[in-house]
Amino acid sequence: MEFKLTKGMTALALCVLNLILFPDNVQGMDIDGNWSPWSSVKGFCVNPDNPLALVSCGGGVMKRYRSCTNPSPQGAGAVCAGSNTDSTPCNTNPCPLPVEFMWSEWSECSARCGRGQQRRYKMCGGIRKRLPEMTAGHGDNAIRPTEAPVLIPGATAPPAGAAAPAAASSLPGGKTWIDLWELELSSPCIDQPPLEMKDNENQTVRDCNTWKYYGPEQPDLWNHTNCPDPCSIYKCPKFSKCDTKLSTTEDPVLRCTCQMGTVMKSDNSSCIVPPPTTPTPRPIPTLPAATKAVTGAVSRTASTLIIIFLTITIVLFLIFRIFDPHRIIQMCEEISLLAAHICLFPTAYAKPVPVECRVLSILVHYFFTVCFTFMLLEATHMYAMVASVVKQKGLLSTKQNLVVGWGVPAFIVLFNMCFEYENYGAVYHCWLTMDTGLLYGQFVPIVVMVVSTFTLIEAAGASEEYPPLKDCDEVDRTTAKISQRTLLIILPLVFASFVTGALSEYEQQVPLYGTFTILNGVVGGTMFFFHVTSHPKTRALVTKVTSSLCKKKK
């Protein structure tokens, strides 16, 4: 191949040779500057607003350099146009979100009203999501992967007090740091969230409560939209009232309260009439041994007094052989009261109650009832004579008075024995018991007789002005009028003695024993005096004896 040297090439070669051999000859020439090639090694990926901070995610820049030395401008030559640096985006991958941002929002509470659970799930797959109320921090979360920036080796930290970088700096392509942070997040899905309510690695569960209550002072201010009044939904049993006064700020509490004296059944199924309560057994009253001996002696003394007076009265009338209908009635009163007090002498009580004690208690009940029955018959006899119902010998015959006076009490006692036999007698006395149903069987008939007797006495007093019947026995009529007044005194005394005696034995109280003794003495003396003076023969005898005594004194 033939090489030809042209004129231009010859001139260029001569110019280069001149520069090499004679460099000083170039000065004074005008040469334009030109850029050198770009550096092949790029720098660190840094924050464009803080070149000393390395960026590993969220977007940074890498810079390359060139110089205006190819050739350098000389003389009046032009400077290189453009920048000597070039920025290229780097590490634009999203920064990892904080752990709490990796979960979905909490679901609604599973319970519409009351306690339930909320769930949230771990986000996985392709997700593009901006969490609420976090916009202001997007830039910081994107450009600050660590709390303290990692500095380029050999660099120094910015001075204290330096202004913080902007939260959303512009990047090539018009993107911002917020746009970069909102890039898709990709996380592998291990498995789908399970249906059962339990924790696992893909979901979390927490308790929730949609019940809102403002206390019993404002019971109608709870969340009625989701929580209607429980009483409007739940039906309480019959005879009960529903209320929510026991509700708390965390839970509704419904209560059904039974009305009209009923009580709730143990299983809360219905309101029932409360069963009768078992009464607490009454403690047995006790007295010290010495006191008990004294009260026993006092009680026997009281019975002895009335026995003595009644015995004298009976013997006196037997001596005079007085057995008219009126006297038979009074004699039965005396015999029954005497027999009742004789039954008080034995101390047959023990634990358990022996049969002897029950028999004594039955006899005391019977003889006291006989006494009050004959007092009622005496009042009937007296009224028939005073009110001129009959001419003589009273309304009933002697046999009729005996049958009624002894038979009716026997029926009353037998009736009580059919139902309350086990309650006759006690472990500490053989008197009448007062803490069982036998109390009504003992006192109700006697009280009825006492009230009836007082009624007849009052009626007889109002009928004294009635004209007597023709051929009326004036002696019997006078005796009946005396009986009207004496019975008005004897009856309350005997009733008071009966009640006081029963209470003294039941309560075991010394004052009651003392009162019983005094009443028995008064009853014995009163019956002796009034029964003797109410009959004409004995009244004449008393008058004769009194006159004789008066003459001897003169």
Image (spheres, rainbow, N blue to C red):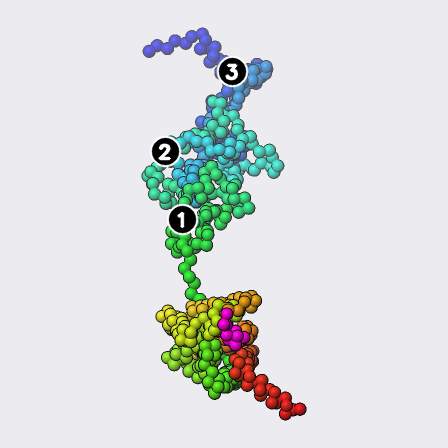
Q: In terms of depth relative to the viewer, which is nearer, 202 or 355?
A: 355
Tell which circle, 1 or 2, labels the residue nearer the N-terminal end.
Answer: 2
Furthest toward the bottom, the residue is 552
Identify the image quadrant of the N terminus: top left
Indicate whether residue 67 is drawn in magenta.
no
The location of residue 290, given as percent across then percent down, is 52, 85
Q: Residue at x 38, y 41 (%)?
A: 203
Badge 2 density bin: few <14, some 14–19, many ≥20, Cα 10 Å: few
* SS type, badge 1: loop
Question: To which residue does mark 3 refer?
Answer: 18
Q: In terms of depth relative to the viewer, which is nearer, 410 or 207?
A: 410
Q: Amino acid at mark 2?
A: Gly
Q: Amino acid at mark 1?
A: Pro
| The residue stretch that appears in magenta | 470-478
Q: Residue at x 41, y 59 (%)?
A: 275
Identify the image quadrant of the C terminus: bottom right
Q: What is the C-alpha distance between the residues marked 1 and 3?
A: 125 Å
* SS type, badge 2: strand
Question: To which residue does mark 2 refer?
Answer: 125
Q: Can residue 228 be seen from the camera position used here?
A: yes
Question: To which residue does mark 1 refer?
Answer: 237
Tell me the number on the disc at residue 404. Answer: none
